[in-house]
Image (cartoon, rainbow, N blue to C red):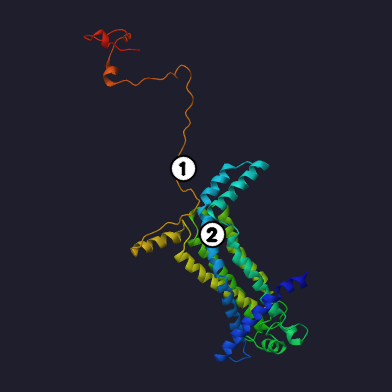
Amino acid sequence: MYDFFVNLLTPIMWGEAWIMSSWHKLFTILGIPEESGWGWALSIVGLTMVIRIILIPLFVKQIHSSRRMQLIQPEMQKIQAKYKGKSDPDSRQAMTQETMALYKDTGTNPFASCLPILLQSPFFFGLFQVLNNLPHVAAGSHAEIGPITRSVASVIEQSSLFGAPLSSRFVGSSDLNTKILTGVLIILMSLTTFTTQRQLMRKNMPESALTGQFAMQQKVILYLMPIFFAISGVNFPIGVLLYWLTTNLWSMGQQFYVIRRLPAPGSAAEREFEDRQRRKGKEVKKLTLKGLDTTPAVAVVEVPPEDSATRQRQQPKGKKRAKQSGPPRRPTDAAPGASPSESPRI
């Protein structure tokens, strides 16, 4: 199973090796020594930037999907309230069908927000395999990875960053420089993750999302993700930690841009954005969603049925007629002073 997984990653490993090699040649031309670990460290940073640039269209799609999900939350709450307390199979199926119909009518895909994260995973594990196999490639016990030949792998293995080889990791290393560098990188990764998530919760979430179950989930993510990085980071090579840290910094800057220019509807960032637009004299446009009914609901008041005694239709009366006293006249009676032909007919 492991070999099958590695074989699937082979094209990605080759592509990443070519990109790293190209960046390294550029930095060598710019004056960084070929055997310096800084050249290969910056090559990993360059590789990360290339991957994130490729993923920009998916990131834009993620932003639009996230905003659609926020806009349809009132409709989602109506559906949930409609089937609240109903656990029978028919009700659950009807609720699912109405939810899917809402997604279809508004063009919303709840899974689109996960695409960038899912598509980054193969690149992450591909780089892990490249760096993890450098000692084996240098020793000749592993096949060459594209431009990373046996001689190139030996150069990378002999290079270091602050005295620590790029393929070394915290676990299994007795080198103090490796432990210090990996510890610093893990702390920076955790801090950037925490800052990015906290910035999202404080600025770019509507007030309705700051309470309830969704808010609790976000708080759990806020505190658990740094712990996850701290636990898993000790098993990754320094080069992978550099890739991870660069990705976090890119995400933090990208999110800052989105919060400022494309804030979520109903969030504090949206109010600040609208205030800036008004100060500049620009028109403030509210985001609308195709297929979403935003008209206010009209309350329907049910009138209880009347009994047979009060169901008789009442004729409207004029003011003069309403003031008239005494018993009503028979239809055949003529009005005073009127001729018989002017008598009212039935």
Q: 18 or 40: nearer the eye?
A: 18
Q: Is residue 275 above or below residue 131?
A: above
Figure quadrant of residue 169: bottom right
Asked if residue 227 shows in the view, the reply is no
- Residue 217 percent across, percent down from the top left: 59, 57
Q: Relative to 340, say whether 193 is above or below.
A: below
> Label 1 belongs to which residue?
297
Question: Any mark on residue 235, and which?
Answer: none
Q: Secondary structure at mark 2?
A: helix
Classify 10 Å Cα crowding around label 1: few (below 14), some (14-19), many (20 and above): few
Looking at the image, which residue sits at the far front? Answer: 341
Q: Nearer the viewer, residue 168 or 154?
A: 154
Residue 67: % across, % down: 51, 58
Task: Kindly indicate whether the residue at mark 1 contacts the one at mark 2 (C-beta within 8 angstroms).
Answer: no
> In which quadrant is the C terminus drawn?
top left
Q: Disc 2 marks which residue?
A: 66
| Residue 26 x/y as whole percent | 57, 87
**Is residue 66 in view?**
yes
Q: Position of residue 342 (x, y in %)?
A: 26, 12
Q: Type of residue at label 1?
A: Ala
